[in-house]
Image (cartoon, rainbow, N blue to C red):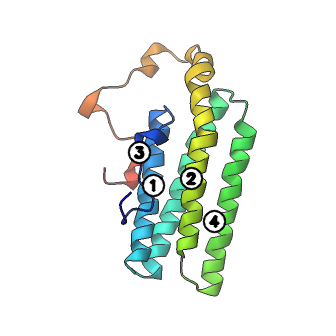
Amino acid sequence: MSDKLLFEWTEDFNIGIDEIDEQHQGLVILLNQLHEAIRERHGSVASRQILDKLVEYTRTHFSLEESLMRLTHYPGWDLHKHQHEDLIRQVQALQTKLDEEGIAISFELLHFLKNWLMQHINDSDRRFGIYFQTDGLQKYAGKVSPDELVQPAGPARKKKWWQRWFRW
């Protein structure tokens, strides 16, 4: 792994749902941006802006995952949603502490977020990916017309609404 990156994305982290995998990569990009801002001492304001962007993007990502889980009647939806809510609560508490105590974002926080994301992707999200590709798609397929499943290929395909967060 590069010394400049906190979290190096590899294909091993893919769970087999393109939109989710792309969003996970987006989370990793933001986490690495936050790491760089702290490492390069860009200041607490810049770091906080990246952290806020990471938190907001995480909420967007969780919303998509949970929607797919409800749509496909994923049996682990409640537990997965609870994990998401728990992380959001923890990060909100950290944001409050940062605001009230005026302390800087630490490497410990970064490593907590990195470890949480890696564990969550490799465990909970991977289980959902397997379900989605086997049972979930079968249940969903009968409820959608074939025309709704067709997407333009290649460059004609528009960016997804959540990709506006990034320049890629």
Q: How far apart are marks 4 and 1 (CA)?
A: 16 Å
Q: Which of marks 4 and 1 is nearer the N terminus?
A: 1
Asked whether disc 4 touches disc 1, contact meaning CB atoms under 8 Å apart, the reply is no
* View extreme (left): residue: 155
Residue 117 — which label? 2
Q: Hey, what amino acid is under mark 3? A: Thr
**Does any portion of residue 59 appear in the rendered image?**
no
Locate the N terminus by quadrant: bottom left
Callout 3 crowding tier (Cα within 10 Å): few <14, some 14–19, many ≥20: few
Question: How far apart are labels 4 and 3 at the CA level?
Answer: 25 Å
Say which of marks 4 and 1 sits in front: 1
In front: label 2 or label 4: 2
Assign a secondary structure to mark 2.
helix
Pointer 4 or 3: first along the chain? 3
Mark 2: amino acid = Leu
Percent x, y of residue 10: 41, 45
Contact between labelled residues 1 and 3, with CB atoms less than 8 Å apart: no
Question: Which residue in the structure is indicated by mark 1?
Answer: 28
Q: How many marks?
A: 4
Q: In this view, does 146 lie above or below 160?
A: above
- The residue nearer to you, when weighing 105 against 140, is 105
Spatial distance from mark 2 to mark 4, Cα to Cα? Answer: 13 Å
Label 4 crowd bin: few (<14), some (14–19), many (20+), radius 10 Å: some
- Badge 3 is on which residue? 10
Residue 39 x %, y % = 41, 75
Name the residue tied to disc 4: 91
Give the answer, above or below, for where 101 lies relative to 69.
below
Disc 1 residue type (three-letter): Val
Label 1–label 2 contact, CB within 8 A: yes
